[in-house]
Amino acid sequence: MSAPDATNTAYAALTARNRATLVQMYAPGAYGRQCVQTIADGARIRLIGSSLWSGSFRNRFEWGSAVFFALPRELDGDLALTPLQILVDGDYASVCAQGRSVLKNGRRYDNDYCLCYRFAAGTIVELNEFLDTACVTAAFGPRGAREMLPRRPGTMERQPSVRPASYRSSELHNADPLAVANRERVWHLFDGAAGEFATRFTALLADDVVCRVAGRTRISGTHHGRERVRACVFDALHAALDGPLELVPDHVGVDGDWAWFIARGLARTRSGERYDDDYCCWLRFADGRVGEVCVYCDTELLNRVLDGAAGR
């Protein structure tokens, strides 16, 4: 077997193993138990935004105390997390999922999630969680507005330890020519002047693109057609900003005809406030164009910016 063939085989095996891990983790009724058995003790975990459950956690013990074992005590029953699609690219993965639950006061708490994982040695060592932060605040109230239920220290410590052989991820990548081309197309979005990102992005879209912006904001919903995406998403956002939105990419992954990127946004509003949002964007390619888009961001922050612009 030649070296390229051996590399492709190793990549395929790595991707298949991590996909199987996620499929098992998201099996009906298995998420909680499988999650704590798959996330490494020293995993870095971040929930975007500044809502009640948001934060950056140095390990799974901090995260377990602040979020994983704290959130269920706010619910009447379990949180059902149903995966809509799982993308895997070697040791990197992204999962779009719908969360369904009921609060103790009887109100629904249904949220949209995009969870981005980094694996190492078959174990999750990094998690970036994107969700509708405006939905979190609407359900639980803003951070600091009410007393949280007491935390129970030691809950995660009573779970079996998860210590991978290494926290270093594999450098294997998809060498399929179509995957390579799509990865390069995504990276090219971040080349050049920040003020031209919208132009580069819309130029990549098919005329009949379908774009979904997750959450509950003025620009959320499903937009059909390239020009409507430009007007309803980019133009509406840029109208609230003082200058261009700069996006700094952190990762690009590819799986079949899908690609996704994680990026940090840097911008300032016309009132002088910072608008530094976090984004995860899924792109589905066909014949070199993007026919389907799904965007996740800190919706609570986005609402403040758009509402502020509308109130001027």
Image (spheres, rainbow, N blue to C red):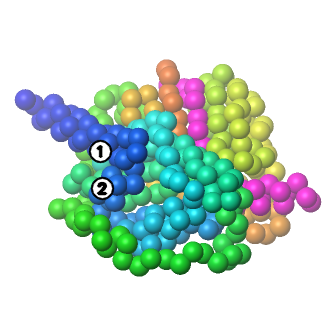
Say which label, 2 or 1, has the lower sequence index. Answer: 1
Say which quarter of the image contains residue 126. Answer: bottom left
Magenta stretch encompasses residue 16: no
Membership of 306 in magenta stretch? yes
* Residue at (33% x, 28% y) in the render: 177
Q: Position of residue 145 (x, y in %)?
A: 71, 75
Locate the C terminus by quadrant.
bottom right
Q: Amino acid at mark 1?
A: Thr
Relative to 136, residue 60 above or below: below
**Can you identify the residue that label 1 sits on?**
21
Crowding near the residue tagged with mark 2, few <14, some 14–19, many ≥20 C-alpha atoms within 10 Å: many
Q: Position of residue 159 (x, y in %)?
A: 29, 67
In the image, which residues are magenta?
288-312
Q: In the displayed image of the protein, which residue is found farthest to the right?
A: 312
Q: Dots 2 and 1: beta carbons under 8 Å?
A: yes
Q: Which residue is mark 2?
A: 38
Q: Say whether residue 267 is visible.
A: no
Q: Could you say whether the residue bearing mark 1 is in a helix, strand or loop?
A: helix
Front in this rendered view, residue 110 or 242? 110
Q: CA distance from mark 2 to mark 1?
A: 8 Å
Q: Examine the image and state in which quarter residue 221 appears.
A: top right
25 with respect to 237 (left or right): left
> Could you say which quadrant of the image residue 245 lies in?
bottom right
Q: Secondary structure at mark 2?
A: helix
Asked if residue 100 can be seen in this view, the reply is yes
Q: Amino acid at mark 2?
A: Thr
- Label at residue 237: none
- Residue 85 spot, x, y in % from top left: 46, 35
* Vertical relation: 269 (above or below) 130: below
Left or right: where 227 falls relative to 206: right
Q: Residue at x 66, y 22 (%)?
A: 207
Q: Nearer the viewer, residue 61 or 55?
A: 61
